[in-house]
Amino acid sequence: MGKLVKSMSIYSICHFLVDFLSCIFVLGVAPQLCFDSEGTLNFDLYFAEVVIYNFFAFAFQVPMGALMDKFKVYKGVGIVGFCLIGLCYAIHAGNPVLLSSIVGIGNGLFHLEGGVNAYSNSKGKSFLNGLFVAPGAMGIFLGTAFYEPLSTTFIPVVLVCLAIVLLFFVQKDEVAFVKEEQERIAASGNPFKLHDILSILALIGISIVVRSIGGSAIQYVWKTGFTIGLLYTVCVVLGKMFGGLIGDKFGLRKIACIALAAACISLILGFNIPAFGFIGIFLFNVPMAITLVILERCNTEYLATMVGSNTLFLFLGYLICMIPNTMNNYVVLTVSVILAIISIYVAFRKFEKVKE
């Protein structure tokens, strides 16, 4: 138990740090390199470095995860990731798109190691997956809030070094559960055939994308200022953290669908009553660990690839949300939640049918 607490504490802290540091770099450091000789911000260059960062941090996890699965390397890549981020902070000059790409790769490498190890530590349950992922939301919020003053200090470099030191303490921990699962699959075959995996992948992908679209429709006029934003992010963190725990106890499919239905009602009420907005965003994030773990369970042989596919769909949702939307926010939110519930329900039915 002590080793488990140590491992998950370190991975969770480092998840906060990797997203915090990446935000500071992409929003604070890289933009300083986007000014032309006349001191005018090149907006196209700034826009490009932000989008390219997100591509490498999220979508590029799939090919990196595939390489990790091919060579069965699930340790050390997180340290490499932080070293890449630290290198970009140390260089602090050159092409902002290239540097942001490297930071994105570093961010993705850490997420892959952390995701695989959280799954192994939890023995296929959802709770530790949520516990690992949750701090990232706080890292993004605080990084977005404080990137301007911190981008010109040595604090980010110190935090990179801290993360690297912390990760050294978990490099000897075995991913025993993952290895056992992979050996079992190698001996007896995976009950999930390629078409089963692709079906579940597509369905969960749809749920992730439409939840991203629905999330973009949550635009509360009362959500202003640091304190309100912090409380709102705490609800996001708690939803991701405890969604897996509740799902493990009462049923993953049931909790994911009920939470989303209740979230939709609460979030709509939240446009006028802030308390419901906080409750709604908590519920809206409950399915996160649940959808991640079903991807991992159906293809443990390629676990890192499945971890990466989760973030690939987040990137697709991010791209879609960049398209200007003039539709009613209530309609967008409601339709998105309904589609997410249907896709999650069908994905679990498919999963359970194969497991039978």
Image (cartoon, helix red, strand yellow):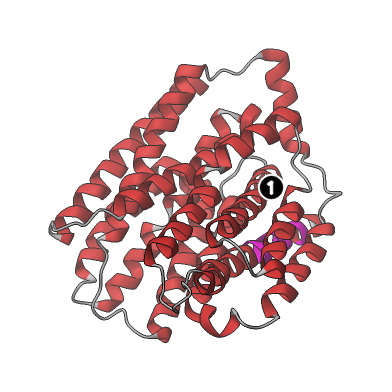
Residue at the image position 22 percent from the left and 55 percent from the top = 333
Residue type beneath disc 1? Glu
Say whether residue 134 is left or right of residue 277. Answer: right
Judged by its main secondary structure, the magenta piece is: helix
What residue span does the magenta drawing correspond to? 6-15
Splitting the image into 4 quarters, where does residue 89 fall?
bottom right
Residue at the image position 39 percent from the left and 47 percent from the top = 256
Residue at the image position 68 percent from the left and 13 percent from the top = 188
Residue 116 position, x and y percent, is: 66, 43
Vertical placement of residue 293 versus 25, above or below: above
Vertical placement of residue 151 versus 15, above or below: below
> Residue tagged by mark 1?
113
Q: Is residue 249 visible?
A: no
Q: Is residue 173 visible?
A: yes
Splitting the image into 4 quarters, where does residue 74 fall?
top right
Dot 1 crowding, Cα within 10 Å, few <14, some 14–19, many 20+: many
